[in-house]
Image (cartoon, grey):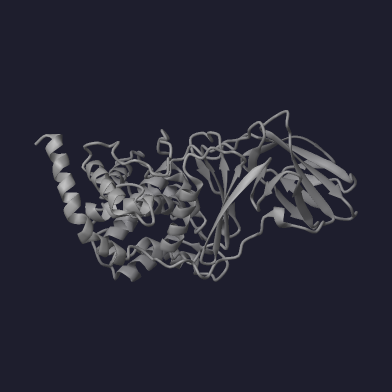
Amino acid sequence: MNTQRIAVLAFILALLTLPAVVPEAQSQQLLNQEPPNNCISASPPHSEQTTEQPVNAVFTRNSSNSSTFTIQYNTTKAGYGFRVEPVDGTKVISSSGFEHTPIGLRWDRETNQSHIRFQLSESIKGFQFKGGDEWIIGPIPEHSGNADISFQTQEGYLGSKLFLLGEYTEYSRHTGCQEISLIAPSETNFGANPDRILDTYTQAAEMMDTGGAYQHVRGFVTPKSTGKRSGFAPSSSNGIANEFVVSTEADLRSVKNTWLHEYIHTHQHFQPRAGLQWIYEGSATYLTARISLEQGLISPTEYDRALQRYANYEAGNTTLNEVTRENLAYRRGSVVLSRIDALHSSNRSSTVIQLIHWMNTQNGDRPARITYENFEQHYQTTTNHSGTFSPHNATFTATDIQPGYETAHTFPLWQLRRLAAASNSPTWMPALLMMIATTLAFRELYPWAVEDLYNDTESTEEPD
C-alpha cells in the first residue's frame, strides 16, 4: 500500500475517531491532576532584601570581560568575621581585604571596603556558566561566619543560589501554592515560547503529587550554549535548590526536555545515600520523558525508542549503585524506574511519583537520608513483593533490563494530547487538521507533519 492510500485512510480514521474519543480524553485521569496545596518554603531571593546588614555585598558585572564579576564588601561594623567560598563553576582571580585559606577566603577584619573578583571557569559535569556583552549568569559563592550579610546589585536579579547581572525580563505563573518564574536577559530569543514553557511547568506541578513543591521556583535562562549539558540545578541543604538554569538551546519537544528535567529536580527534597545516589538523575530523566508524553510533547514511539536506547547503553562493568550523576545514572536509572511503573502502577497512576513523595516526607520539613535498603524495603512493601522484576539485581549487577514501554497508549488519545498541548480550546477544523498530521507522524510516514503551533525552533542537542 503506497503512502497516498495510507494518508487517505488516516484522514477517514481521523473523521471517525475525533467525535468518539473527545469525551474519553476529558474524563481520563492520567496522573494527579490537582495543583500543589502544601508547598515548602525556600530561601527568598537576595533581590528582595530591603534592609542593610553589617556587611553589604554588592555584585557588579565587569563590562570588559563577559565571564567575570566582582563582589564589593562594605563592612560597617568591626568585630564581625565571615568567609567566602567559591562554588563549582567559578574561580577567584583577584581579591583585597581577604586572606586565602584551604577552605576559602577569610575577611581580614580590618579592610572596610574589600572585594573579590571571580571568573566563570570550571565545567560542572559538562555544564558551563556563560556571560554575554550585556549580561552574566552564574552561581552565588557560599558565605559563612558570624556576620549578617546583605546582597545587592544595581542592575540584575540575585536569587538564593544563582544570579543574573544586567537588564532582565521575568515571566511568572502560579499554580496552587507554587509560583514559577523564568528570568532571562532582556530581549532573549527563547528556543521555545516562554508561555508554553510555563504551561509545561504548571501542568507538571499538577501531575506530580511529590509532597515537595517549593513555594517559589526560579529558572534562569541563558541565551548561549552551555556546553555538553543544557541545564543545571544546584543543590542545597534541602536536597535540590529551588533554582536552576537552562540554555535556550534546550528543546522542549524532546524526550530529554531539559526545561522540564531541571524543574523536576526542584521536587527532590531527600538525600540518597550510597547505592541510591543514581535516583536523582534517574527519576528526573524518567519523569521528564513520562510527563512529556502525557502532555503531548512527544509521541509514544519517541518515548519507547528513548527507553530502548537507554537500556542498550554500554557502561562496561560499572553498576548503578556506583554512580551519582554519570551517564549511567540518567539512562539505566530511568529504565529501572520505567520498569517499576509499568509493573506496579494502576489506573495510570505512577508508582515512581509515589516513591518520591515517600522519600520527600520521611523527615518532616528536613530532607531525609534515604539508603538503598530503605528504598528496597519501601518498594517491596508497596508492591506486595509482586512481579518478577528485582530492583536489587538491576542496581547491583549489569544484567539486562527490559524497559517499561508505553504500549498502553493508543494513538487517538495521544493525538488529543497533542491538541491539548497546542491549544486549550481547539476548534473542529484545526483539531481535524492536527489529527491528520499527528496520525501521519505517529506512523512515521512524514516526521515533519506535526507543525509546532508555538513557533518553537528545532534543536540539534544530543542526549547527555
Instruction: Spot the residue most to the top.
Output: 64
**Image position, residue 61 (x, y; %):** 72, 37
Out of 348 and 344, give the one closest to the viewer.
348
Give coordinates of residue 109: x percent, y percent. 87, 49
Q: Please name the residue shown 79% across and 52% down the image.
A: 82
Question: Can you give x and y, in whole percent of width and height, for residue 278 in the image?
Answer: 44, 51
Which of the image's four quarters has the N terminus?
top left
Say which quarter of the image contains residue 114: top right
Q: Is residue 318 above or below residue 202?
A: above
Image quarter for residue 326?
A: top left
From the viewer's perspective, is 195 left or right of 301?
right
Where does the image place residue 293, in percent across and percent down from the top left? 33, 51
Q: Could one spot residue 116 in this view of the protein?
A: yes
Please say if 148 is above or below 167.
below
166 or 460: which is nearer to us? 166
Of residues 60 and 322, which is closer to you in this image? 60
Answer with left or right where residue 277 lies relative to residue 155: left
